[in-house]
Amino acid sequence: MRRVRLAFHRTFHAVAHSRNFRLFFAGQAVSVTGTWMQQVATAWLVLRLSGSGLALGSQAALAFGPILLLQGVVTAVDNPTRQSFFAEMVRGEDLTNAVSLNSAVMTGTRVVGPALAGVLISTAGLAACFLVNGISYLAVIGGLLAMRPSELRRAPTPARGVGRVRDGLAYVWRTPALRIPLALMAAVSTLSWNFTVVFPLLAEGPFRGDARTFGLLLSAMGAGSLAASLAMARLERPSPARVGWAAAAFGLLSTAVAAAPGVRAALPLAALLGAASMVFMIGTNSLLQVGARPDMRGRVMALYGIVFLGGTPIGGPLAGLLAERLGPREALALGGAAAVVAGLVGLQRMRRHGLIERPDLPPRTVQPAAVPALRGQEGLST
């Protein structure tokens, strides 16, 4: 029993040590469940009205298109702010744990949300999913209002002025420990992370199902993602090698799901796919959070939001078009192949820059990346 308690505390220690993070964690759990319900309902509504893969991809592009210019406009502001907020709510040693637990919320709700959406669509109709999602935001607002600002760990505020975004881009470009994970995420999110486009077509077409089939596929992915998130929460530090191999595994499992003869065979593969995707996403997020200087973390995480969500306006229509011309299985398999190539190239580049440790050397602690002072930052400490 004592071992169970110790394992539970190790997995959830960021929740135990920070009241503000507990409130944030609970609010997100409620709200993101509603968000997943609405995503399923939106995708199924578009498919019902159009019957077109390209229309599904276009819907995804319209939802996230504003990310590229920096429902999409709000995300462009919310995502980088929320990602950098973790460092203010928890201690430095708890940062990776907090990121992993937040990912557990995002993916654990993927189990509940799509399943509830499938039931509601069949019983109460599509509109009920949109209503539930709107109400769920009250949990986030309540949690934020209940936080104690005095307990936040404020990060240094960078000086304002012309060229701040350009300085952030230059900082990432000069820092391989940040540039390579971001480039890898950009490739995978654009070419391979288009499940809301391909899965509805796969469910209705080759798997001969309906909205519940679509929900089951997403729920299976969510179950695997939740297990991986909780496992990642117990790790003490991020690993560049783990990120590269996870991207390659994600691609291989995508092709396996594409080749599944039916939904029963696809569900366990989708669970493994969800696990690989979460190891990749959490690993990339943690590398950027830990590796960025505090005064640059907000801008680095803004770029993370751009490449993670901003790839959808390009990849969504492309996946939809491929699904229409070649079939949903082929579209999913091609995206998987792209992830395999991206993961292997990323591993090669990380080795070239010395980011992957040799097994015969002791592990080193990841330090925030420092570069020569950029314009307007000469007075900021590194």
Image (cartoon, helix red, strand yellow):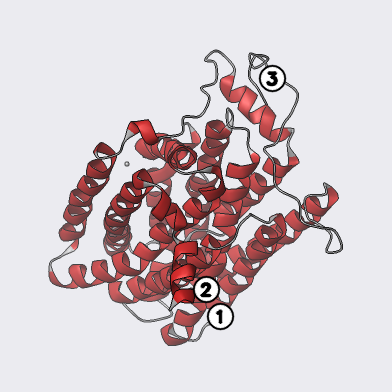
Dot 2 corresponds to which residue? 329
Determine whether, in the image, residue 33 is placed left or right of residue 221.
left
Q: Residue 323: in sight, yes or no?
A: no
Q: In which quadrant of the rendered image does the N terminus lie?
A: bottom left
Determine the residue located farthest toward the left in the rendered image.
124
Dot 3 corresponds to which residue? 374
Residues under labels 3 and 2: Cα distance?
47 Å
Q: Residue 382: in sight, yes or no?
A: yes
Q: Are marks 2 and 1 in contact (CB under 8 Å)?
A: yes
Of residues 32 and 339, which is closer to you in this image? 32
Residues under labels 2 and 1: Cα distance?
7 Å
Decide which of tag 3 and tag 1 comes sooner along the chain.
1
Residues under labels 3 and 1: Cα distance?
50 Å
Q: Which mark is residue 259?
A: 1
Mark 3 lies on a secondary structure that is loop
- Say which amino acid is labelled 3: Leu
In the picture, residue 9 is in which quadrant?
Answer: bottom left
Q: Position of residue 349 (x, y in %)?
A: 79, 51
When the figure is inspected, residue 330 is found, relative to residue 28, above or below; the finding is: below
**Residue at left 63%, top 48%?**
287
Label 1 crowd bin: few (<14), some (14–19), many (20+), radius 10 Å: some
Determine whether, in the image, residue 240 is placed left or right of residue 147.
right
